[in-house]
Amino acid sequence: MRDVAQFLKVLGDEARLQILWLLFNHDELCVCDMMEALGITQSKASRHLATLRHAGLVVDRRDGAWSYYSLSPAKTGLERAVLQSLRRELGRHPDANRLTKDLKQWLARKERSAACSAPEPTQSKSSGKPGARTRAAAVLPNNSKSQPNWPSIAPGRHVSETG
């Protein structure tokens, strides 16, 4: 049962759920794509992707300096069932459309500029340190630093089969 507990533990993080949502909707994404859509740093994106990779949920492919990630096929019936339910439930979440839209806008900008890199860091008004302010902080309403509340997976919660 330890393997099941570890699998479910990996899913218990908002950023990893958001990454999975993006990969549910795209065959393959570069780390910079996820950074931009989620408004997180390269180190955070890489750390979460490494956790997903070690859990067997994603695979990576290198192309020069860039790393691309895609979903790995589920290895067990439990993984397949949980991921199918997760995809359905995340698709119903209000923040799913925003994430998809943010990624689509980034991919359009990236295609126009033919570059896969994050913009220059901005200066934080609160700390005065370059790079301290993330893209997410800059685009949330009223400059709020709160992140959206993604659903937590609670024991005994039943997933609706409609949809």
Image: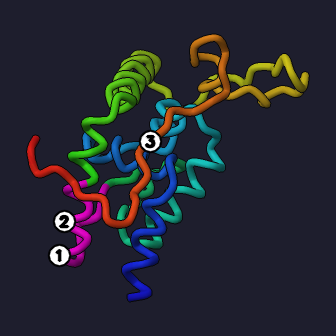
When the figure is inspected, residue 139 is found, relative to residue 66, above or below; the finding is: above
Q: Distance between the residues labelled 3 and 2?
A: 19 Å
Q: Answer few, some or many: residues within 10 Å of disc 1's Cα (few below 14, many 20 plus, some between 14 and 19).
A: few
When the figure is inspected, residue 9 is found, relative to residue 20, above or below; the finding is: below
Q: Residue at x 51, y 54 (%)?
A: 13
Check disc 1 and report the residue beneath it: 77
Q: Main secondary structure of the magenta part?
A: helix
Q: In which quarter of the image is the C terminus?
A: top left
Check disc 3 and report the residue beneath it: 150
- Across the whole image, how many numbered discs are drawn on residues? 3
Check disc 2 and report the residue beneath it: 81
Q: In which quarter of the image is the N terminus?
A: bottom left
Q: Answer few, some or many: residues within 10 Å of disc 2's Cα (few below 14, many 20 plus, some between 14 and 19).
A: few
Q: Is residue 79 magenta?
A: yes
Residue 3 in the image: x percent, y percent?
A: 40, 84
| Amino acid type, mark 2 | Ala
Q: How far apart are marks 3 and 1 (CA)?
A: 25 Å
When the figure is inspected, residue 133 is found, relative to residue 40, above or below; the finding is: above
